[in-house]
Image (cartoon, helix red, strand yellow):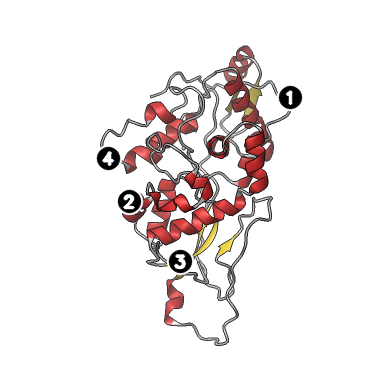
């Protein structure tokens, strides 16, 4: 294992999908220089005080060293896929996308408890998908793929604390299942209230044996998987596309934030919602019956999707 170097700085596919609204989660990536910045800055959406910031003592000199120009602060917003993280890190000159792709499925990260519990990874394109915590990181240009991924995975281990893990276990879910569910909620929701209602829809559909039919899972396969793999690029479609697979997809579809993880664990109490869609402005409408769902879609001119791709 390479020794970590602590530096001071640094897919709604169709507009009218019957039960989804895919959030782009685009966010500007900031780069900055600060001699007193922590290695990891806790994401502002986190509700758990679980991040340990590692800071460097104040510089006694006011002049910058030649290495300061290599230090960069990189933000990984909630909802970023592994592919988008890799693209961002390459664009920032931190490490090469090819190097990240070469190591993302490695067993090197088994020393992290959550990663080691994932189980069979043959049905997911990127082993660390969903396990790279959204946060702002102090990285270094040319730092290296393993070093960077370890920082992101290590932050995830801290955010998903013992209380969250116990709650998942008490509900009969593995933590991996909760992360998968949270990743879908992240992509389908815009507001905090939506998160809990979307969670209720997915939970209710799972209980009734209904397909989840989330367009976000299709967008993930088409845009964040196929362009980054070789061989049969369609091999994950029947495993992740929730218009085809029964139950949860085989992999998370992004890195969920703490709010989506909490929503996955705490769906709206007593909700009977089974359907939802969003209008052109992104407002989500929930329904308990298919008839009500169709009426609302007709009202807003939304066309239902069937067994996509």
Q: Position of residue 205 (x, y in %)?
A: 59, 21
Crowding at mark 1 (Cα within 10 Å: few <14, some 14-19, many 20+): few
**What label does residue 102 carry, if any?**
2
Residue of label 1: 270
Instruction: Name the front one of labels 1 and 3.
Output: 3
The answer to which image quadrant residue 233 occupies is: top left
**What label does residue 230 carry, if any?**
4
Q: Position of residue 256 (x, y in %)?
A: 55, 44
Camera-side residue of 72 and 159: 159
- Alpha carbons under labels 3 and 4: distance apart: 31 Å
Q: Is mark 4 on a helix, strand or loop?
A: loop
Instruction: Name the front one of labels 2 and 3.
Output: 3
Instruction: Name the front one of labels 1 and 2.
Output: 2
Q: How many marks?
A: 4
Q: Position of residue 154 (x, y in %)?
A: 53, 56
**Visible residue check, residue 28:** no
């Amino acid at each position: 294992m390479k020794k970590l170097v602590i530096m001071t700085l640094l897919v709604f596919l169709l507009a009218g999908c019957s039960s989804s609204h895919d959030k782009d989660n685009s966010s500007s990536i900031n780069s900055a220089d600060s001699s007193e910045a922590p290695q990891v800055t806790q994401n502002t959406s986190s509700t758990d005080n679980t991040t340990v910031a590692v800071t460097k003592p104040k510089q006694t000199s006011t002049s910058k060293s030649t290495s300061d120009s290599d230090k960069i602060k990189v933000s990984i917003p909630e909802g970023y896929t592994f592919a988008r993280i890799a693209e961002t890190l390459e664009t920032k000159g931190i490490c090469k996308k090819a190097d990240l792709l070469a190591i993302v499925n490695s067993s090197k990260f088994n020393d992290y408890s959550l990663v080691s519990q994932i189980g069979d990874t043959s049905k997911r394109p990127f082993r660390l998908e969903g396990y790279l915590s959204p946060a702002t990181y102090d990285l270094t240009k040319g730092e290296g793929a393993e070093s960077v991924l370890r920082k992101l995975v290590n932050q995830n281990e801290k955010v998903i604390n013992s209380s969250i893990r116990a709650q998942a276990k008490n509900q009969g879910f593995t933590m991996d299942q909760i992360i998968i569910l949270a990743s879908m909620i992240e992509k389908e929701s815009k507001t905090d209230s939506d998160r809990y209602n979307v969670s209720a829809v997915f939970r209710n559909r799972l209980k009734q044996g209904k397909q989840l039919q989330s367009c976000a899972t299709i967008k993930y396969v088409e845009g964040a998987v196929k362009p980054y793999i070789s061989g049969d690029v369609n091999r994950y479609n029947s495993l992740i596309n929730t218009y085809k697979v029964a139950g949860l997809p085989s992999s998370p579809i992004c890195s969920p934030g703490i709010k989506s993880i909490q929503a996955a664990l705490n769906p709206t109490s007593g909700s009977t919602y089974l359907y939802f869609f969003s209008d052109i402005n992104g407002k989500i409408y929930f329904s308990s019956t298919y008839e009500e769902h169709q009426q609302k879609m007709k009202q807003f001119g939304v066309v239902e999707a069937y067994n996509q791709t």
